[in-house]
Image: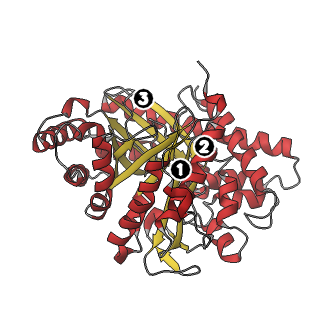
Amino acid sequence: MLFTPFEIKETVDMFLRYKLDIRAITLGVSLLDCVSSSGAGARRRIREKLLRVAGPLVKTGREIEVEYGIPIINKRLSVTPLALIAGACGEENYAPFARTLDEVAGTLGIDFAGGFSALVQKGLSAGDERLIASIPEALSSTERVCASVNVASSRSGINMDAVRRMGTIVRETATRTADRDGIGCAKLVVFCNAPEDNPFMAGAFHGPGEGESCLNVGVSGPGVVKAALEHHRDASFDELADIIKKTAFKITRMGQLVGMEAARRLGVPFGILDLSLAPTPAVGDSEARILEEMGLESAGTHGTTAALAMLTDMVKKGGVMASTHVGGFSGAFIPVSEDEGMVAAVRSGSISLDKLEAMTSVCSVGLDMIAIPGDTPATTISAIIADEMAIGMVNNKTTAVRVIPAPGKKAGDWVEFGGLLGGAPVMPVNPASSAAFIARGGRIPAPIHSFRN
């Protein structure tokens, strides 16, 4: 028997009481066969292929929800980085490609579509330059499209020309969506070591090394982990680690079941299962509250980084025991606006931007969903990106930056994005200038341990 009656009851409790869910099923689709010398021709091919391949995605997800009683929060689509597809068409503005993607997602009822992306860790092609320049218009004229740019890797170093450019792009995107607190930036992420099989937005894209199509699954369960720890408040760290690992194992088995069944029904290969403890704004579904359950008065106080390191590692260890296809990020996310416990920590002064940066050295991603003052200079945003890219490059891990310079807002003000994106207080940034540093351009070389062949 695959599942015992006790395990089934335990899993039902996870759904009903502790907010366990499948955060996303993400269908990755290759668009390499949609390249055309005509922009209109390429977009026609993209539209036709996505309608054909992704057409059953939402229906399949809903059927599985009903049959298994498992909530699937988002049905998502990721495509080949569009800088690779649009480069042959000769057009200067790639925003129409984003609008095509948005139109298809809307027609099919898909929640988000990722892949308005460029991979520029070592240099920028003409197509990369055009896509990056088009990001502000693309994200302000669409609802479901997400963009990402990989500007660094442990093998290539940090492309500081791209980092400098992205500081400006983030500011421009915020300005174009000023009427919604700069929400366009919530759909834009800058990466180091971006994974090609990530089911989570805003960074999902179907990497060039992926096959024709596949289904990736993102599972979330911070409420389940917190509930498990509540019953062991006198336990040692050895015991806590074991509890987290076993809980992650159970969550992963559930995700594997859903992912393989969805892939079978769609007639595509099962890709990866990303077991990341992605929180929501709902009370009780918080990463920060897990850390506090370990004995911290508030997330951000001394000991937070150590607690987060153990949490991330045990989630990964439990996941790989439950599935042979664990990928993406798999660990712990710390998005500020999406986590009510993190919001509370920011409001109390327990957590700062500098502490968040330190925490990213041991968690799954990076500086995520952080609102900063609207008048933050583009060079300061670029410097924030550069610092985070350095952490990823040196530690050979994925790091990312998704910051929102909220137009017209200053430190202490509130921004509201709604839904899973939540809301957050605006956090202060260091007022000292980084302009001369960012103006240097060029490339920060890869660390010595990058030479592995």
Rendering quarter of residue 322: top right
Nearest the viewer among 308 and 38 is 38
Q: Which residue bears the numbered disc 1?
A: 400
**Alpha-carbon neighbours of circle 3 within 10 Å: few (<14), some, or many (≥20)?**
many
Residue at image location 44% in from the left, 66% down from the top:
419
Label annotation for residue 270 = 3
Estimate how packed mark 2 is, as few (under 14), some (14 to 19) or many (20 or more) residues with alpha carbons within 10 Å.
Answer: many
| Disc 1, SS | strand
In the image, what residue occupies the spot 59% across and 72% down? 427
> Is 96 located above or below residue 257 in the figure?
below
* Amino acid under disc 1: Ala
Q: Quadrant of the N terminus?
A: top right
Q: Earlier in the sequence, mark 1 or mark 3?
A: 3
SS at mark 3 in the image: strand
The image quadrant of residue 64 is top left
Residue in the picture at 35% in, 25% down = 211
Count the numbered circles shown. 3
Residue under the image location 60 percent in, 40 percent down: 393
Residue type at numbered disc 2: Gly
Q: Quadrant of the C terminus?
A: top right
Viewer-side residue, 116 vs 69: 116
Residue topped by disc 2: 392
Alpha-carbon span between mark 1 and mark 3: 26 Å
**Which amino acid type is marked by label 3?**
Phe
* Nearer the observer, 135 or 158: 158
State the CA–CA distance, disc 2 to disc 3.
Answer: 28 Å
